[in-house]
Amino acid sequence: MELRHIRYFIATAEELSFRRAAERTNVTQPSLSEQIRQLEGEIGVRLLERDTHRVSLTAAGRNFLESSRRVLREVEDGTRIARRIA
């Protein structure tokens, strides 16, 4: 799992739109969709329900969103501290 997968998932979960999440993360929509599919395949659960008109979070997706936000906060905090120390 890579941090970009987590960032893409968070953007998609918050936007509830692959198009808007792709714009927000500056990637193409097909690439973002593929990254989300890879993430779901890696963890073995469906995080998002999709149809042609809407995106919603599954129960697992809601839980993973909370965890993902914590992970990114920790990484960002660690990065800030390391830079300050250096």
Image (cartoon, helix red, strand yellow):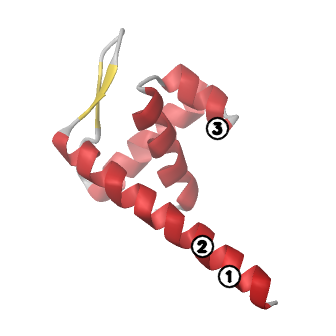
Real-space Cα separation, disc 1 to disc 2, in angstroms:
6 Å
Judging by the rendered image, the residue that carries numbered circle 2 is: 77
Residues at marks 1 and 2 touching, judged by CB atoms closer than 8 Å: yes
Quadrant, the C terminus: bottom right
**Three-letter residue code for mark 2:** Asp
Q: Is label 1 in a helix, a strand or a loop? A: helix
Upstream in the sequence, badge 3 or badge 2? 3
Q: CA distance from mark 1 to mark 3?
A: 25 Å
Q: Determine the residue positioned at 65% across, 27% down.
A: 23
Considering every residue shown, the one lying at the far top of the view is 53
Quadrant of residue 78 in the image? bottom right
Q: Estimate the x, y position of residue 37 in percent, counting from the top left.
A: 40, 40
Residue at left 45%, top 43%?
A: 9
Q: Residues within 10 Å of mark 3 (few under 14, many from 20)?
A: some
**Pointer 3: what residue?**
25
- C-alpha distance separating marks 3 and 2: 20 Å
For label 2, the SS is helix
Against 81, is 12 above or below?
A: above
As shown in the figure, which amino acid type bears the numbered disc 1? Answer: Ile
Residue 17 horizontal/vertical position (percent): 46, 22
Which amino acid type corresponds to the residue marked 3 in the rendered image? Answer: Thr
Crowding near pointer 2: few (<14 within 10 Å), some, many (20+)? few
- Tally of marks: 3
Against 79, is 85 above or below? below
Query: Relative to the observer, which residue lies in front, 15 or 41?
Result: 15
Q: Residue furthest bottom?
A: 85
Q: Are marks 3 and 2 in contact (CB under 8 Å)?
A: no
Q: Position of residue 34 (x, y in %)?
A: 49, 37
Give me the disc on residue 81: 1
Numbered disc in front, either 3 or 2: 2
Q: Are marks 1 and 3 in contact (CB under 8 Å)?
A: no
